[in-house]
Amino acid sequence: MTEDKAFSTVLPDWLKLPHAERGNRIGLFGGSFNPPHSGHQLVAETAMKRLDLDQVWWLVSPGNPLKDHSELEPQEQRIRNVERLSDHPGMRVTGHEAVLGTSYTAETLACILARRPGVRFVWIMGADNLASFHRWQNWRSIASAVPIAVVDRPGASLSVMSAPFARVFARHRIDETDAVTLPGLKPPAWVFLRTRLDAASSTNLRKLRRK
Ligand SMILES: Nc1ncnc2c1ncn2[C@@H]1O[C@H](COP(=O)(O)OP(=O)(O)OP(=O)(O)O)[C@@H](O)[C@H]1O
Ligand SMILES: O=C(O)c1ccc[n+]([C@@H]2O[C@H](COP(=O)([O-])O)[C@@H](O)[C@H]2O)c1
């Protein structure tokens, strides 16, 4: 029995790794999504359109290694919320990192790339995450594993070009007019996508809920 078949017999759908064909162009959008909001939708849809992706996989994290988890909703609940928000062809939602036993992106990517050979994956993130990307475990290896698309976010636009990541990988940045080529490029390669801005944030939504 293949590893995928063995997994599919025991795992609930929300923990499975989505299906992909060789040659597919797939965006990996990791996040806490605690809760998900319109800013996340904008990021996923912008990447889908501008990079001409076949699918975007929302990787709902068991818990960001750099964040406090005291207010973190259970992963399955966050997945159900993302499913309601991302009800659009091509969007897939999974908590597969819980199966892999990691929240570290470098480890997640190594597993996904090994299990889905021949797929053109791109890592997607908001501009605020780029500013702290050099604090992620093995961040240079992440940039060497998959191309990266950074989507603009209010308050973070100016920090993008001065981020340690942007400086180290300056010569690997492509112009956003060439964004559609990103999934086919050999990493490191990255693009900064300017778009309509959306100020939504999970922190604000959690604050509003407490009122
Ligand atoms: N409004 C937004 N515009 C652009 N990118 C966003 C926006 N909100 C979140 N993102 C990006 O989406 C991904 C997941 O974000 P996350 O789930 O941490 O949401 P958040 O609103 O930043 O949460 P929190 O306020 O709890 O830190 C990250 O890459 C983040 O940069
Ligand atoms: O690998 C790391 O060290 C690392 C550090 C911080 C964040 N991440 C991942 O980045 C993604 C975005 O996290 P968040 O909480 O900003 O939505 C999510 O998939 C996290 O697991 C990963």
Image (cartoon, rainbow, N blue to C red):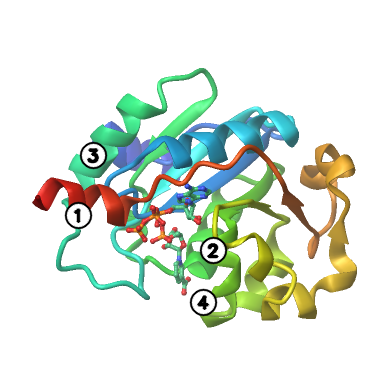
**Along the line of sight, which residue is nearer the eye, 113 or 34?**
34
Beta carbon at label 2 within 8 Å of ligand 1: yes
* Mark toward the start of the polypeptide (1 vs 4): 4
Name the disc covering residue 88, or none: none
**Front of the two marks 2 and 4:** 2
Return the disc, 1 or 2, that comes first in the chain's sequence. 2
Other residues around mark 4 within 10 Å, as few (<14) / some (14–19) / many (≥20): some
| Circle 3 Cα neighbour tier, 10 Å, few/some/many (<14 / 14–19 / ≥20) | few
Residue at mark 4: 136
Which amino acid type corresponds to the residue marked 2 in the rendered image? Answer: Asp
| Label 2: element kind | helix
139 w.r.t. 87: above or below: below
Give the mark nearer the N terminus: 3 vs 1.
3
Q: Position of residue 197 (x, y in %)?
A: 58, 42
Can the viewer see residue 135 in this picture? yes
Residue at the spot of label 2: 128
Gap in Å between the C-alphas at discs 1 and 2?
20 Å
Q: Is residue 9 left or right of residue 121?
A: left
Q: Which residue is mark 3?
A: 10
Mark 4 or mark 3: which comes first in sequence?
3
Of discs 1 and 4, which sits in the foreground? 1
Residue in the image at 32% along x and 51% along y: 202
Which circle, 1 or 2, is nearer the viewer? 1
Residue depth check, mark 2 versus mark 3: number of the one nearer the observer: 2
- Going 79% across and 65% down the picture, which residue do you hit? 188
Is 107 rendered above or below residue 39?
Answer: below
Residue marked by disc 1: 207
The answer for how far apart the CA atoms under marks 2 and 3 are is 37 Å
Most distant residue in the top direction:
89
